[in-house]
Image: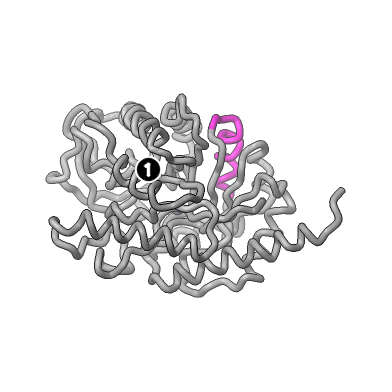
Amino acid sequence: MLLTTIAGSLPKPAWLARPEMLWAPWVLSPDLLLDGQRDAVLAALKEQESAGIDIVGDGEQSRQHFVHGFLEKIEGIDFSRRVTIGIRADRYKAEVPTVTGPLRRHGSVHREEVLWARAHTDRTFKFTLPGPLTIVDTLADDHYHDRRRLAWEIAGLLNDEARELEAAGVDIIQFDEPAFNVYLDDVESWGIDVMQRAIEGLRCRTAIHICYGYGIRANIEWKDTLGDEWLQYERNFPLLAASGIDQVSIEFANSHVPTRLLALLNGKDVVLGAIDVATSEVESPEQVAATIRRALETVPPERLYLSTNCGMAPLPRKVARAKLTALVAGARIVRTEFEASPKD
Ligand code: ZN
């Protein structure tokens, strides 16, 4: 009960990539990179285990960015044709590759990474993939000229990939969809169908992570414009509750997400963001416990999991480590309260 996990990314060691930034360039030369990434995965797994995290991930140590890591090996996407576009409804600029022809996947993108991580942890292992809507939003398209069709093609590739990763030993496959909180009409009209396509036939548990973005300045400023109540989940959650997704990972700590909205995820596992990733200030265990108790007003304990609001890639490593420890300590406080209170 009240198992802990991470949203996805962890900071990379400074010997692997430039610290405290998104799209951080690799520091190692190409001939040393693969070995370095593997070592960083071992460190990430060990740090999570030492902190007491129950459901671990590879910390996304082998990809430069959570979206482009998958796309780098897809035919039809030209990384030499990079253009700067406004993404997430023009909230911030990003340099993205261009779709120049039909998309094809030649073998698994992440299978070797999964096998490596799987061989080095006995804990429940979660692997993250970018979701189709977010991928479409992080690309320039010079071929399909239709976001829905492009998303459908991508969902097919993701499904093939997810099936291979499941066979390689992944327990939970999570699709990261921050764009779900931005394109609410698209989610309703085709985003959910596309997500269903991505999880089709999977027997492992499936999750979707929907947040308000990494703790970068553009996102923090955007959140300031969203008012006293953030209601994006109000439209997404009922659609997800009716979908085949098992778990929904959400931003909650220090947010203006009304607790009542969690009830809209009825029947699904709620993976609660109980750690704010937009600040280097480390939560106290009691603060984390208070966040968890608030969610428990609405979510039954057997369906509540605890996580970070989003990936921690841009944070200093020691801050990320301390936040994982705080997450576990906060969960322990609340678990102890449950054990102490008489059962019905
Ligand atoms: Zn996120």
The answer to whether one can see residue 148 in this image is no
Q: Residue at 53%, 34% (x, y): give it.
A: 245
Quadrant in which residue 145 is drawn: top left
Question: Measured from the top left, where is residue 41 in percent x and y?
Answer: 34, 57
Q: Residue at 24%, 41% (x, y): give it.
A: 140
* Magenta-drawn segment: 231-244
Q: Is residue 243 magenta?
A: yes
The residue closer to the viewer here, 242 or 34, is 34
- Numbered disc 1: secondary structure: strand
Q: Amino acid at mark 1?
A: Pro
- The reply, left or right, for residue 240 in relation to residue 166 is right
Answer few, some or many: residues within 10 Å of disc 1's Cα (few below 14, many 20 plus, some between 14 and 19): many
Would you place residue 99 above or below residue 259 in this image? above
Q: Residue at 51%, 65% (x, y): give it.
A: 51
- The reply, left or right, for residue 205 in relation to residue 81 is right
Quadrant in which residue 254 is drawn: bottom right
Quadrant in which residue 25 is drawn: bottom left
Circle 1 residue: 130
The residue closer to the viewer here, 124 or 319, is 124
